[in-house]
């Protein structure tokens, strides 16, 4: 590394493409996902696509769970606290490894199956968080304009650029992701102070049973 390290926000904002070891051969899987609706089928095909992406980018594995239920929507301080379709969690040891993605297959309010484009875009979005932590080795994964540009680049590489939304311009405050469970929430350090109960409840609610 040369020069003064820039913040995760500045690095994230400045990078608009995904760097591959070789081009991922995932177009067929992406197109298959656009024809599937059932949670089990989406989980199997989606895991296959994640594996292709991780191999092509040289990243550690990322496990996909597609839950056949609506996202639990919660309010905190009177606001809808959880409003995304999926979540990303990274487990750290000395380096970040073992990402996991959870996507709810039904919409929160109307309990309809997620539209195929929405499902695929959510999957690519959550994988982009995996790329940030394990590929770019950022210590945070903010929703910068560069983050969204990398998702568009990824989708175009897969030949499904039409699933991604247009440009986002976000301020640093609005770029704080609400769909990333960070390592400090994930691990109880021996002898350390346990995180607040509401955080443990949230992690449990999103990902099921915690380890240990
Ligand atoms: Zn996100």
Image: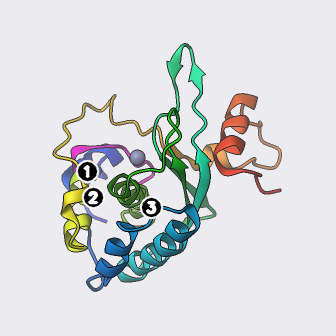
107 relative to 66, above or below: above
Which residue position is annotated with label 3? 130
Where, by quadrant of the figure, is residue 121 drawn? bottom left
Tell whether position 141 is magenta. yes
Give residue 145's position: percent from left, percent from top: 22, 45
Which residue position is annotated with label 2? 151
Where, by quadrant of the figure, is residue 135 drawn? bottom left
Residue farthest toward the top in the current orientation of the protein: 78
Residue at (39, 69) in percent of width and height: 33
Tell whether position 211 is magenta. no
Residue at (45, 65) in percent of width and height: 134
Asked whether mark 2 lies closer than 8 Å to ligand 1, one says no
- Give the secondary structure at mark 3: helix
* Magenta residue span: 138-147
The secondary structure that most of the magenta stretch takes on is: loop
In the rendered structure, which disc, 3 or 1, sits on the residue that comes first in sequence?
3
Report crowding for label 1: few under 14, some 14 to 19, many 20 or more residues within 10 A (C-alpha).
many
As rendered, which of 138 and 98 lies closer to the eye?
Answer: 98
As rendered, which of 59 and 92 lies closer to the eye?
Answer: 59
As rendered, which of 80 and 109 lies closer to the eye?
Answer: 109
What colour scheme has been applied to the protein in the rendered image? rainbow
């Amino acid at each position: 590394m040369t020069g003064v390290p820039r913040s995760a926000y500045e690095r994230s904002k400045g990078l608009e493409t995904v760097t591959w070891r070789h081009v991922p051969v995932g177009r067929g899987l992406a197109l298959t996902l656009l024809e599937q609706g059932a949670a089990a089928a989406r989980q199997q095909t989606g895991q296959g696509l994640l594996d292709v992406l991780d191999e092509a980018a040289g990243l550690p594995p990322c496990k996909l769970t597609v839950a056949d239920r609506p996202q639990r929507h919660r309010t905190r301080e009177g606001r809808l606290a959880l409003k995304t379709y999926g979540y990303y969690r990274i487990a750290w040891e000395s380096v970040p490894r073992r990402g996991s993605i959870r996507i709810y297959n039904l919409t929160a309010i109307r309990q309809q199956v997620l539209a195929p484009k929405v499902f695929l875009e959510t999957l690519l979005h959550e994988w982009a968080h995996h790329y940030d932590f394990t590929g770019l080795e950022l210590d945070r994964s903010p929703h910068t304009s560069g983050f969204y540009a990398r998702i568009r680049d990824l989708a175009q590489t897969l030949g499904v650029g039409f699933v991604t939304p247009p440009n986002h311009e976000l301020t640093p405050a609005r770029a704080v992701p609400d769909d990333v469970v960070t390592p400090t929430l994930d691990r109880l350090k021996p002898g350390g102070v346990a995180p607040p109960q509401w955080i443990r409840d949230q992690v449990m609610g999103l990902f099921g049973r915690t380890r240990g």
